[in-house]
Image: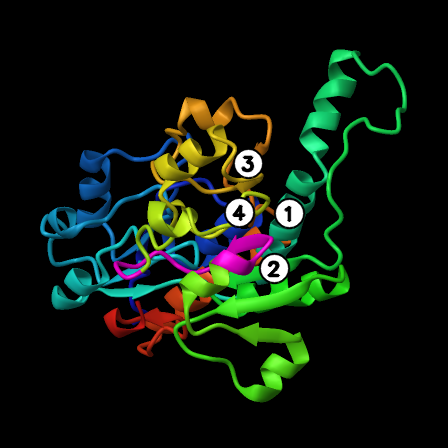
Amino acid sequence: MSKSRLTVVVTRRLPEAVEARMGELFDVRLNPDDAPMDRAALVAAMQGADVLVPTITDRIDAGLLGQAGDRLKLIANYGAGVDHIDVATARQRGILVSNTPGVLTEDTADMTMALILAVTRRIPEGLALMQTGDWAGWAPTAMLGGRIAGRRLGILGMGRIGQAVARRANAFGMQVHYHNRRRLRGEVEEELGATWWESLDQMVARMDVISVNCPHTPATFHLMNARRLKLMKASAVLVNTSRGEVVDENALTRMLRAGELAGAGLDVYGNGTDVNPRLRALPNVVLLPHMGSATREGRLEMGEKVIINIKTFDDGHRPPDLVVPSMI
């Protein structure tokens, strides 16, 4: 007698190929409207599922997990970050959590370099000038930006994405520096041409560009706070493609408005879609709608990892991308 198929509830629309494959393997319940579920809908989903497949838009806290019931056994997150999931409480309740690490590295690193170039070369300003039809022609002093070759890039968080950013920055002729909770091995530093700073304060004060590439954890919340932002040179630029919570967005906005920083490029925000309107109004700021990982290839690979994690769990084994509280 064959065993019954796992019931898998997916909270958002996924690529068609991913949804189709899930339907072949599991009793899958999809979200055709693609609207984020409210708390009541999430509770209902968790109570009726063996496996929940959430995304970053679903905040799964202790209160929500307390209403999950006994059926839910795996939260197979569609995404690498798990700061929206109370992993410790899930484990206490016997619920495993998996994620999709590694597949978005190159895409996010590409977007980091795109933001560095967009801010320093004033690309959005030039685009806006062309779209309004106000361009009067070339002039020697018009739309002057800055050359990135030779500039010091300070990478905050030298994991997979930070290292991928370093490789790209080297190709552009930037000097690569980094701060990480653990120093890289000597051969990796040599390969990346990267200089380690034990003191984040000292690194921040000497860089031309700061790239935030560390995850959001209790230890990294507002790591770039008002005091640390004030250490940056007035000519420096900050780029964040990691998590908005790592940067004190209000302090950053005040400094940009006061001319105490040259510019910023942001793909993530401290309050989700509620972006400070004063930040949006600044000409020296490039804002993107959390699209650093938005490639067709990346989204398909994320789905493949989710399916592998669920199928491995269904076969009675440990999901390959299992997240444990000590990792966070």
Q: Which residues are magenta?
A: 205-219
Q: Position of residue 86 (x, y in %)?
A: 21, 57
Q: Amino acid at mark 2?
A: Leu
Q: Quick one: quadrant of the C terminus?
A: bottom left
The image quarter containing residue 50 is bottom left
Q: Position of residue 258 (x, y in %)?
A: 47, 30
Q: Amino acid at mark 1?
A: Ile
Q: Position of residue 179 (x, y in %)?
A: 47, 68
Q: Is residue 45 left or right of residue 240?
A: left
Residue hosting label 2 = 153
Q: Is residue 211 magenta?
A: yes
User: Mark 4, residues whose alpha carbon is within 10 Å: few (<14), some, or many (≥20)?
Assistant: many
Q: Amino acid at mark 3?
A: Leu
Alpha carbon of mark 4 to alpha carbon of mark 3: how far? 14 Å
Q: Which mark is nearer the camera, 2 or 3? A: 2
Residue hosting label 4 = 238
The answer to whether the residue labelled 2 contacts the one labelled 1, judged by CB atoms less than 8 Å apart, is: yes
Q: Which mark is nearer the camera, 2 or 1? A: 2
Q: Which mark is nearer the camera, 1 or 3? A: 1
Q: Is residue 137 left or right of residue 112?
A: right
Q: Residue at x 39, y 42 (%)?
A: 30
Secondary structure at badge 4 equals strand
Q: Nearer the viewer, residue 49 or 193?
A: 193
Where residue 116 is drawn, which disc sits there? 1
Q: Quick one: quadrant of the N terminus?
A: bottom left
Q: Nearer the viewer, residue 161 or 316?
A: 161
Where residue 214 is drawn, which disc sits there? none
Q: Residue at x 49, y 25 (%)?
A: 280
